[in-house]
Image (tube, rainbow, N blue to C red):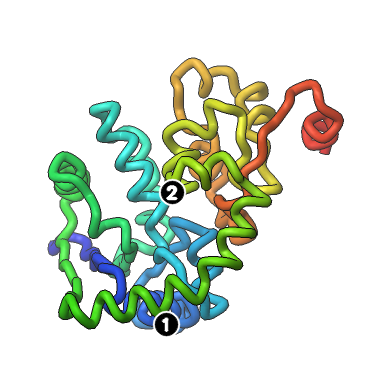
Amino acid sequence: MSNRQIVLHIGFSKTGSSALQVFLSQNQNLLASYNYGYPEIDPYHFEKAKKGEISSGNAHLLREVLHQDTQNASLNQSARLLTHFLSANGRNSTLIISSESFGVMTEEEIAFFSRLLRQFSLDVKIICYVRRQDQYIEAAWTQWQSKLSDSLQLDLRTNPDVVKSRIDPIRHYVANGWHEGRDPAPGFSTANYLAEHPDIAVLKLNPFVQYILDQKITLSKCSPGEFQRIDPASTNHREKHNR
């Protein structure tokens, strides 16, 4: 019996990654009919791609959890997350995961990712595209200068301190944000979840990742960019807890 196949798309910036991710997201059901699974590992970026917008693919969350596991010298959370999405997409389907963030992994993270894939006995096929440096610079400037103002103003309103630190918001939540009581999405309260699941707090597991694993759901409306500070004594916190 052959190993389960996984197609890993390393979406280097300015190589048409967003166009490919838009196609994959918008044709998820069609792909499934041909036994190709394109799971919503990262619901925020998946939904952006589905709308035809620029995103970081469907696996940015997996990559950031892997980054944190590498820091902790443990594959606990990334292994459980990958298990969840492998089981959700059928035993015979080929899994497709795509993210630009795979292209900026450290050697240590690559070694951990390789270990993770071997742990699942996966037949891995890697796809990546490169671009001439002069064309890359021209394309990067055209895109970035056109969207800088609107994107910056939006981020400053929703999460000014993270923007000031110049840290990717998903990486910030996985590494620090949940420790600070921030919420990764309007419908999820980090403080409430940890209060209701003290064992998760003791084990120092990421509550949002744990929620996805426990509920076995796709959180298509969750936006990791919409972080908020949570005051456990605030009215909003109590209202969320009572819903």
Q: Is residue 228 left or right of residue 173?
A: right
Q: Answer whether residue 130 is visible to the viewer in this image.
A: yes
On screen, 238 above or below 186?
Answer: above
Quadrant into which the N terminus falls? bottom left
Q: Is disc 2 in contact with disc 1, using a CB cutoff of under 8 Å?
A: no
Is 181 situated above or below 150? above
Mark positioned earlier in the residue sequence (2 or 1): 1
Instruction: Say what secondary structure mark 2 lies in.
Output: loop
Q: Is residue 187 above or below residue 1?
A: above
Identify the image quadrant of residue 131. bottom left
- Tell me the tag on residue 168: 2
Q: Which residue corresponds to the image point at 26% horizontal and 68% vertical from the top-left?
A: 12
Q: Residue at x 47, y 31 (%)?
A: 176
Going by the numbered disc 1, the residue's amino acid type is Phe
Q: Quadrant of the C terminus?
A: top right
Residue 65, position as x, y percentages in the image: 37, 42
Left or right side of 133 for 207 = right
At x 37%, y 36%, the residue is: 77
Tag 1 secondary structure: helix
Q: In front: 8, or 101? A: 101
Q: Is residue 13 shown left or right of residue 41?
A: left
Point out the frontmost of discs 2 and 1: 2
Q: Would you name the residue on which mark 1 appears?
A: 23
Residue 62: image x %, image y %?
Answer: 37, 50
77, 230: nearer the viewer: 230
Residue shown at 70% from the left, 31% from the top: 230
Q: Position of residue 147 (x, y in %)?
A: 52, 72
The answer to whether residue 24 is visible is no
Q: Residues within 10 Å of mark 1 (few under 14, many from 20)?
A: some
Give residue 112's position: percent from left, percent from top: 18, 41
